[in-house]
Image: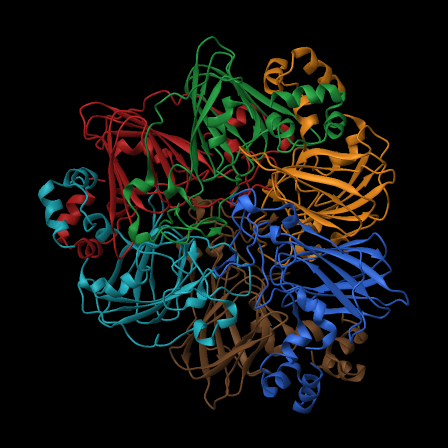
Chain colours: A green, B red, C cyan, D brown, E blue, F orange
């Protein structure tokens, strides 16, 4: 995976991660216990008596991410990996920075709808519906504009202007997950067979080799 | 209800409104049909073939609300009432403006957790746990700080400084609902009996009359 | 918190507690393990092979609670804290006793709808909708009457007569949580700043000090 | 179906009815509209502006049901069919009266856990776990005792004493449904083939004919 | 329980087991950890870093089960007990083999809807609605036919022909549970009192003894 | 979209369609009303009194689909579009036929986990986890083998042999949705800008034009 996606990658949790409609909470809160050796659907929690105000806090979302990478964008995630108190609460955030002509390339959040607000600059954004229509809903957004990307739909943001852009995205899961299409299909570990990708994308196998070499 | 809460009131839908963990979506999207005469849990939808990109869009979140009211704050809501495409998707937004010494007074979202980001200024914020502890978790937030208010907990934000403050809140429901404690308890239509409130708050009935006259 | 609320307080679990729509069960039952050191959303369970009939049983709901307290009421809770077998099952009970002119003061169950049946006496009950209407739905109930308080709404019961009253409440969660409005707002630990409460309730700060001293 | 089950039958809604974990509410309330021609999962609602306090109210649970029937019991249901305001709220009630030696025969609520409180008399109650254990958890209950029947498990109550008994049951669904085992298996419309039942219950076909004639 | 049900019994997990609508997943997957001493709603998981492709795999569904038993049928289950990776994913399978005149006797899945496909032979199948209608929906199925048994409804399949039959059933839970009616009611451990069953099925107690002796 | 995907496309409903964890049912069944003009989350239902046994039935899954298309595969869907009775029940099926060297190319079900059984032939199958690992879990499956593709993960099946192959897939939604990656990204209506795709896949724009021309 290209180095430029390191921040983007942080949006997903360490090992394997993505999520959808979180079930309801069964107590006031259930702060994720980062030291627990017990794995469950979501995370095991700290003893609620030991919860601290810092468990509900994150600092630094006013800081720009480093967009010096191939896609020209950087995602600063604020989900349950950053705020342990988000466990069981079904929501998270991300700040996205875009260099001029930078983009957040086509991707899916398997477990969350996204609502994005442009804080600075202009973005061309869109999402595509499922088969058979595969209809593209796209729009140019300016400062103060808000747009919704429904859960599970492929979507993207592109900064077509000569200035940087900044957006805040809220996601309907504590752990929304990210599947960047190009990276996942052409950069998986190990690789998907070139025969399969050549037929899927209707290109010859050399082209598949070429694309796989980029990721 | 005091006039200062008009914008705050917009956070809830017209007739009666508040919500919690939204069930999963059963199609790509289900845009609320504002003309439907059919009422269901959530909203009836438009024929999906007629969905427009504008159904997923809102403009103007960079505009400050009018904080010239008793509480010195203004909430600009962006939920399913503003973006019909949020129907069934379990997320919404709000911008909150705070005059110097203004506050978003103690309130509850009966159907959503809130995650708040400070865009400008400083805020003293807190939430209180349920009985019997009623423990206050509070913190001073500065620009770029993020804080979580778990679903159903009484919480507040207070601008203790001499500059205005701005925050963006994301909420884990398309229709989170707002119950402003003072307004609801002392300003209901019709009023709750003074005897009940006098005993509940351990004050004499004249004081209840006095408070009720404010709302 | 006033001593009269000790029983009421039992409605909430030990540390911090309140809940909403419980997710479905994934096995016949999952009896809460009171000795477990593992915290999860809800409770970790006993080995199902060790479940006993007593895990599904509680005794003593025919016994009146002690209503000799400031509010003149007593809540005897029967939730997952009393019946471990209720874990994952999404329901609980409470018996409420009311002295003459006693009341169950305005409160919220953040995680449950309540359906209340009057076994003896008469009660004036009500709930208030969210912003902006804050409409009070109220009614006098007599023996055999049943009333519904929707999840997350502020509600109360008041015994306006000269006889004691008894009610049984069923709640749509194993751990519904209780937020008594006056106690939580004016009796939190530590206290909410008097400036905030004075502005929220539109009273002077001395009055806030006076009310806070009661809780 | 035997006449004695008329009241029991009322526990289920008119046409076909039973339910499990109700999804969360998406507004303060959504009162079922009994006049709607629109059928949805649950019920279509009245315009919330037209909701009345009576929509949340039921009267008469202090009245005994008529137990003069073959099973010697009567169920008075209080679910969404009786209280339209219970729609979307995930809870309901029933009063059960038992003549001496009367019983609520083995049955299942396909969509609800039940928590039962004995108001008067004594009951022998039990539930049976699923395959392969089919373990019976049973107990004698007296006044003030509470017992839990987990969702989907076959259960029963039997008044083994010479006095009448009364219980109140709360159920974790607005529309829990009832499947009385004997009536459903031997009294369906039309009948299940005698060959199938003879082999299932390991009896000869004449015995099946005999049992089917009772229902 | 008759020996012929050993395979059927495997459909349910070891101790006590059955389930309904599984809550959403909160990460890519959460493979059940068969060695964990921690019990939760569902199963505790392996460290996701240790997940293997075999955790998502089962072999042998082309093999016929042994139908030499009283009911003349065999169920080969493929749920979370066989594929640990199904944990949190809300789906499972079963293959059912039927000898000539064999049947899968009336039973309930308390936690799943079933969709059944006939691979070979012909079956007479049906389900019965809840009270008060207890309406039987039945149909003869041939090769390539598909039929749906809604969650919680009593249903059966009967091979009325002289050839064996084979079906594949998919169920909407990782752990659907099975309650075989005759076995559960007449073969529980310990037995339900004969008085209760005699009155429930309107037969004399000797007949109950006779039936109980079969299971 | 290539003609070969016509059957595959049928897996999704008419306008735009895909779904995830379906909420629980609130009555015995709620058969989709294909004539209704009311759109809701899922489908409006027929009057339950008019439900027919055919509403739960589908015929023809033993028939091979036509695999004479670019991908060499055909999907025959059996979801709520084919069986109206599946509405609210959270499960569906599909038969997949594969010509020699045919494949079901990389795709996502945004609203369902899939469990696939090989009825005939051999398949090389796999799924890829979300960022940052993008780990490929792959395996060769033979007759009688079963494999799980967790909800929202990109996955594929490839018939690497010289014989046809047949599989049955069960999906944890009545309307799982299909997003075929290549078709959706390179064949949307209208097209995604070539600049965006060139940067996302790290190829030059001519190559994007070439791929887009295939779909």
Q: Residue at x 34, y 77 (%)?
A: C62
Q: Which sits in the foreground, D106 or B18?
A: D106
Q: Is residue E148 left or right of residue B56?
A: right
Q: Which sits in the foreground, C28 or F98?
A: F98
Q: Residue at x 51, y 68 (%)?
A: C48
State which quarter of the image contains the C terminus of chain E.
bottom right
Q: Which sits in the foreground, B83 or A131?
A: A131
Q: How many marks?
A: 0
Q: Is residue E31 visible?
A: yes
State which quarter of the image contains the N terminus of chain E.
bottom right
Q: Which sits in the foreground, C17 or F47?
A: C17
Image quadrant where residue A211 sits: top right
Give residue F121's position: percent from left, percent from top. Answer: 83, 45
Image quadrant where residue E16 sits: bottom right
Q: Residue at x 70, y 73 (%)?
A: D185
Give residue A4's position: percent from left, percent from top. Answer: 50, 21
Q: Is residue A144 above or below residue E141?
A: above
């Amino acid at each position: 995976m290209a180095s430029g996606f390191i921040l983007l990658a942080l949006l997903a949790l360490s090992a394997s991660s993505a999520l959808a409609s979180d079930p309801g909470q069964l107590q006031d809160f259930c702060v994720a216990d980062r030291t627990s050796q017990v794995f469950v659907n979501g995370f095991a929690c700290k003893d609620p008596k030991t919860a601290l105000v810092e468990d509900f806090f994150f600092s630094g979302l006013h800081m720009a991410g480093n967009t010096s990478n191939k896609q020209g964008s950087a995602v600063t995630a604020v989900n349950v990996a950053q705020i342990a108190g988000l466990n069981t609460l079904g929501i998270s955030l991300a700040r996205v920075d875009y260099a001029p002509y930078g983009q957040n390339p086509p991707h899916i959040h398997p477990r969350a709808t996204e609502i994005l607000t442009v804080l600075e600059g202009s973005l061309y954004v869109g999402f595509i519906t499922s088969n058979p229509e595969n209809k593209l809903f796209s729009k140019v957004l300016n400062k103060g504009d808000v747009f919704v990307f429904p859960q599970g739909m492929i979507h993207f943001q592109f900064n077509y202007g000569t200035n940087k852009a900044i957006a805040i995205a809220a996601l309907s899961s504590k752990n929304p997950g990210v599947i960047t299409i190009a990276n996942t299909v052409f950069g998986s570990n190990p690789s998907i067979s070139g025969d399969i990708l050549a037929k899927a994308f209707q290109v010859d196998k050399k082209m598949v080799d070429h694309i796989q070499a980029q990721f």
